[in-house]
Image (cartoon, rainbow, N blue to C red):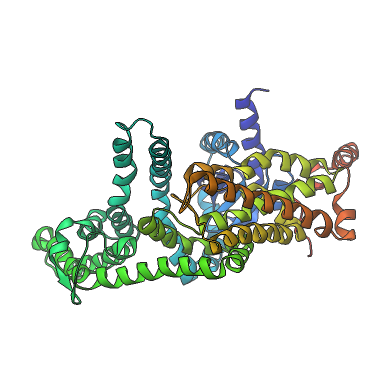
């Protein structure tokens, strides 16, 4: 079977289990998940879907998300979209009416004010990550060339490429913020541009002269939100004949004045406090702080609360050139990898889980942990906790070196695992920084493995999952029972 046929077969297997084409209102994908908008959630056959060898797990949020893993999802999604487009949509309206109440209830469940706020924060900053990664890698390459004394005629150009985006990141944050909050995006960018304009150095506020960039991304976010509210007020009260002239003028004028004579100072103080607190915490309580951050990051990801850290990372990068928090948080992925390897050895007869681990481990080493989380450790229960233990010890290792004066940071957010190596930076030499981060990964792998191997399985859990799933499937088929009733690829959540 060719790769195209294989991907189409996966899509064809998934489609009837999510209610058929008539039940699909939208199709999208991220790095690892096929994200489906459903008209009627009750039509989804969850257990049969989890039993598919290609499915590593499912996640419910505003959309129904099927974890297929990196690479696979990008190839399966077009095939899935094609199947949906080819199928007749005769009953779409009926299904929409029948599922409206269920969809509304699910949306309401996930639409708490705090979660909506975090989702908006993510929508503002996540689109900036590709540029942060690209510029961060160029900055690392430039630093290496400077240290080696190579290509002196090229390094200034690389420095310009690496720094240009960061110098104007406030503008992009303002643009995305206004867009996310329902205003005119370009007006949000225009107001945020005031923050980085060199001319603000001639202005005095709160008894001190402003400096370009003061307040950074936090100031840009606040300025753009203010601009949206001013713009909406103008749309309500300004006559339509004057709207095109008065609304943008008042939006920039009012928001700009508040930004210059208020927000820049306040946001600057907050940004400085964030940077000082992060440095103080790691310098004085690095091992303990690293232990807690590394151990709690996986649960934060599960709850969606990790998105609150994005502006903090960005602020630290803007201030110091790197975020000291990301390498510590990346240790959670190392614990997850170690736990998965232990599960692989503890369940020698369960072919389906072992296949999931083998296919997901490469992505796990590169910092993409969702396939292992949703396909292996979280459903099993205890291995998720022991993975957190591995992350805690890895984070504590890096935090300990921060206490000793060796800061390890990342020049961009997004990657972790081995993919973070090109983005590493710190206050010491690059070789020492890389060695500390690599040591943290090894500690995370080792502790996650040992904790899972020795304490990750109760006797009942082993009896339930260390079974020959291949033989069980053959017996079930021979008996004439659909294979979807066999032991699923993604196990049911087990009691810890």
Furthest-top residue in view?
2
- Left or right of 59 in this view: 357: right
Instruction: From the viewer's side, name the closer residue of 37 and 342.
Output: 342
- The residue positioned 34% from the left and 43% from the top of the image is 162
128 vs 37, nearest the viewer: 128
- The number of numbered discs placed on residues in the rendered structure image is 0
User: Residue at position x 54%, y 54% from top?
Assistant: 327
Q: Residue at position x 31%, y 69% from top?
A: 267
Reply above or below: 323 against 13.
Answer: below
Q: Position of residue 278 (x, y in %)?
A: 47, 66
Quarter occupied by residue 192: bottom left
Q: Position of residue 352 (x, y in %)?
A: 78, 42
Check the image and name the residue furthest to the bottom.
206
Q: Quadrant of the N terminus?
A: top right
Q: In the displayed structure, would residue 7 be above or below residue 440? A: above
The C terminus sits in image quarter = bottom right
* Relative side of 237 to 368, left or right: left
* Image position of 237 (left or right of 11): left
Q: Is residue 73 above or below residue 455?
A: above
**Residue 124 in view, yes or no:** no
Q: Residue 478: name its quadrant.
A: top right
Res 294 quadrant in image: bottom right
452 and 469: which one is in front?
A: 452
Q: Residue at x 43, y 52 (%)?
A: 126
Note whether residue 107 is visible. Answer: yes
Q: For this view, does 313 lie left or right of residue 24?
A: left
Percent of width and height locating residue 318: 36, 56
């Amino acid at each position: 079977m060719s790769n195209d046929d294989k991907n189409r077969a996966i899509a064809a297997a998934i489609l009837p289990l999510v209610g058929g084409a008539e039940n699909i209102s939208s199709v999208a994908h991220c790095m690892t998940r096929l994200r489906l908008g459903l008209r009627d959630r009750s039509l989804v056959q969850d257990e049969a879907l989890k039993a598919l060898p290609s499915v590593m797990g499912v996640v419910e949020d505003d959309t129904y998300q099927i974890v297929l893993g990196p690479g696979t999802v990008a190839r399966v999604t077009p095939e899935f979209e094609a199947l949906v487009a080819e199928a007749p949509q005769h009953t779409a309206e009926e299904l929409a009416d029948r599922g409206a109440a269920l969809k509304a209830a699910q949306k309401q469940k996930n639409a708490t004010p705090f979660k909506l706020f975090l989702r908006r924060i993510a929508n503002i900053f996540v689109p900036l990550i590709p540029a942060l990664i690209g510029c961060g890698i160029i900055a690392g390459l430039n630093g290496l060339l400077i240290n080696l004394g190579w290509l002196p005629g090229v390094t200034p150009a690389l420095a310009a490429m690496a720094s240009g985006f960061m110098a104007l990141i406030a503008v992009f944050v303002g643009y995305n913020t206004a867009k996310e909050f329902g205003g005119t995006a370009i007006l949000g960018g225009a107001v945020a541009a005031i923050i980085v304009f060199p001319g603000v150095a001639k202005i005095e506020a709160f008894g001190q002269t402003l400096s370009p960039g003061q307040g950074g991304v936090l100031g840009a976010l606040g300025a753009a939100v203010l601009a949206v509210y001013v713009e909406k007020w103008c749309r309500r009260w300004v006559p339509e004949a004057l709207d095109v002239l008065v609304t943008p003028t008042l939006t920039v004028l009012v928001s700009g004045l508040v930004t210059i004579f208020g927000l820049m100072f306040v946001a600057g103080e907050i940004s400085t406090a964030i940077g000082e607190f992060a440095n103080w915490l790691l310098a004085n309580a690095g091992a303990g702080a690293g232990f807690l951050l590394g151990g709690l990051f996986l649960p934060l990801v599960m709850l969606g609360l990790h998105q609150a850290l994005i502006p903090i990372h960005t602020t630290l990068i803007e201030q110091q050139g790197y975020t000291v928090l990301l390498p510590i948080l990346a240790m959670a992925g190392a614990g997850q990898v170690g736990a998965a390897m232990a599960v692989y050895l503890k369940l020698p007869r369960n072919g389906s889980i072992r296949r999931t681990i083998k296919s997901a481990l490469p992505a796990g080493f590169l910092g993409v942990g969702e396939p292992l989380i949703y396909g292996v450790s979280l459903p099993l229960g205890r291995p998720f906790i022991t993975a957190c233990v591995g992350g805690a010890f890895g984070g504590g290792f890096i935090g300990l070196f921060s206490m000793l004066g060796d800061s390890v940071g990342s020049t961009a957010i997004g990657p972790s695992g081995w993919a973070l190596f090109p983005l590493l930076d710190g206050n010491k030499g690059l070789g020492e920084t890389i060695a500390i981060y690599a040591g943290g990964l090894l500690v995370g792998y080792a502790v996650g493995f040992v904790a899972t191997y020795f304490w990750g399985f109760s006797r009942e859990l082993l009896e339930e999952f260390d079974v020959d799933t291949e033989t069980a499937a053959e017996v079930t088929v021979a008996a004439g029972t659909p294979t979807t009733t066999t032991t699923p690829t993604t196990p049911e959540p087990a009691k810890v």
